Image (cartoon, rainbow, N blue to C red):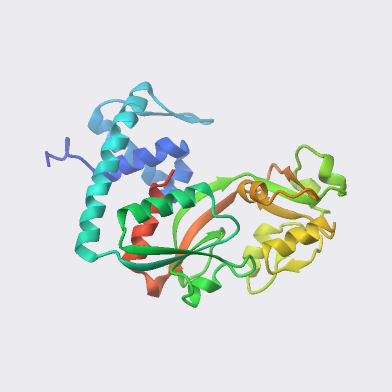
C-alpha cells in the first residue's frame, strides 16, 4: 500500500458503492451497519483521496457528480472481481459445503432468487434447500433449527437472532375484497386505515411485529398463514397490508390491491441464530448483500 494519503481503503469504496445505490445516507448506513455520520466521514475521506467531489448532497436529494458516475462505472466491475477473489479464497480455506436451509416469508422475490443462484454458482458443493416460513411465526424455524437462515419481514427485535442484510424495500398495498368501499380507490392514506380492520398474524409472532403489519386500531381476525388472510379478505372480513411483490404474486379475481402512501415501506431482512452461525450462513449473507 502507499502512504496514508494515497492508500486504498476498501471500506471507503464499499461505502461509496452502497451510497451510489441508495442515494440516501441513512439507508446506506443501515446496510453498512454504521451511523449516518460515519458514512459521511468515509465518503469525505475517499473524496480527499481522489481530490474531487463524487457526491452532491442537498437538503432534498443526494446524487452523483459526473466524476462520481464515471468512477462508479469503473469501480463496480473491479470491486466485484476483488470480492470474488476473496470469496473463492475463503471458500477454499474454510470449505462451504453440505446443505444450507433457507426459509422465506411471503414471497421469494427476484433478488432472493438471484442471491441463491449466485451462492450456488460460487459454492457448487453446498446444496441449497428453500422452505416457506409460516406468516404467524417468522422466527420459530430459525430458533428450532429447521432452517439455517430466514428471510423475514422487518422489524426484528430478537436478542438471540442476528439481523444480516436488509433489502427489498417496497411500497405497501392494502388487500381488500372487490366489494369493499376502498376497492375503487387509486391510493389510500393512513387516515383510511384508522377505521379499516386489518387482518394480522396471530401468535407466536411477537406483538411488536404483528402491530407493525396491522397498524389499524380496528379489530380484525388473526391468521396463521398468508392464504388464510387472503381468504378472509376475499370474504370481506377485513383488509390486509402486503408488500407490492406479494400482492402481485397472489393476484386473484375477488381481491383488489390498493397502494397506500404515508406508511413505512415493507422491508426484508436475513436473520440467523447467534449460536448457529456457520461459514455457509455468512457466505449466503454476502450473496444476499451483493445481489441487485
Place of residue 65 in the rendered image (x, y in percent of width and height, measured from the top left): 38, 24
Indicate left or right for 109 with 251 as reference.
left
Q: Is residue 221 or residue 287 the one in the foreground?
A: 287
**Near-viewer residue (65 or 116):** 116
Residue 168: percent from the left, percent from the top?
Answer: 53, 48
Residue 282 lies in what quarter of the image? bottom left
Quadrant location, the N terminus: top left
Residue at (43% x, 69% y) in the render: 148
- Would you say residue 61 is visible in this rendering? yes
* Nearest the eye: 290 or 195: 290
- x, y percent for residue 133: 57, 66
Query: Where is residue 15 drawn, in percent x and y?
Result: 35, 42
Please tell me whether residue 74 is drawn above or below residue 277 in the rendered image. above
Q: Is residue 241 above or below residue 203?
A: above
Residue found 26% across the figure and 48% down from its top: 84
Q: Residue drawn at (37%, 46%), measured in percent from left and top?
A: 38
**Position of residue 80 in the picture relative to residue 221 (left or right):** left
Amino acid at each position: 500500500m502507499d502512504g496514508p494519503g494515497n492508500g486504498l481503503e476498501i471500506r471507503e469504496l464499499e461505502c461509496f458503492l452502497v451510497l451510489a445505490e441508495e442515494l440516501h445516507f441513512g439507508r446506506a448506513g443501515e446496510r453498512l451497519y454504521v451511523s449516518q455520520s460515519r458514512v459521511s466521514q468515509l465518503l469525505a475521506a475517499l473524496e480527499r483521496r481522489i481530490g474531487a467531489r463524487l457526491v452532491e448532497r442537498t437538503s432534498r436529494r443526494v446524487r452523483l457528480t459526473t466524476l462520481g458516475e464515471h468512477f462508479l462505472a469503473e469501480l463496480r466491475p473491479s470491486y466485484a472481481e476483488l470480492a470474488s477473489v476473496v470469496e473463492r479464497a475463503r471458500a477454499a480455506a474454510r470449505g462451504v459445503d453440505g446443505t444450507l436451509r433457507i426459509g422465506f416469508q411471503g414471497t421469494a422475490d427476484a433478488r432472493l432468487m438471484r442471491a441463491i443462484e449466485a451462492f450456488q454458482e460460487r459454492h457448487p458443493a453446498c446444496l441449497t434447500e428453500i422452505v416457506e416460513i409460516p406468516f404467524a411465526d417468522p422466527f420459530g424455524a430459525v430458533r428450532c433449527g429447521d432452517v439455517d437462515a430466514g428471510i423475514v419481514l422487518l422489524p426484528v427485535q430478537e436478542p438471540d437472532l442476528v439481523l444480516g442484510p436488509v433489502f427489498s424495500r417496497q411500497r405497501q398495498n392494502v388487500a381488500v375484497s372487490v366489494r369493499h368501499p376502498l376497492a375503487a380507490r387509486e391510493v389510500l392514506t393512513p387516515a383510511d386505515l384508522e377505521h379499516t380492520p386489518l387482518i394480522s398474524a396471530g401468535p407466536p409472532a411477537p406483538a411488536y411485529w404483528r402491530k407493525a403489519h396491522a397498524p389499524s386500531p380496528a379489530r380484525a381476525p388473526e391468521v396463521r398463514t398468508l392464504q388464510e388472510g387472503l381468504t378472509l379478505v376475499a370474504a370481506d372480513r377485513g383488509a390486509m397490508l402486503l408488500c407490492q411483490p406479494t400482492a402481485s404474486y397472489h393476484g386473484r379475481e375477488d381481491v383488489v390491491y390498493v397502494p397506500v402512501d404515508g406508511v413505512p415501506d415493507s422491508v426484508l431482512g436475513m436473520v440467523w441464530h447467534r449460536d448457529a452461525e456457520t461459514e455457509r450462513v455468512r457466505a449466503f449473507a454476502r450473496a444476499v448483500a451483493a445481489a441487485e
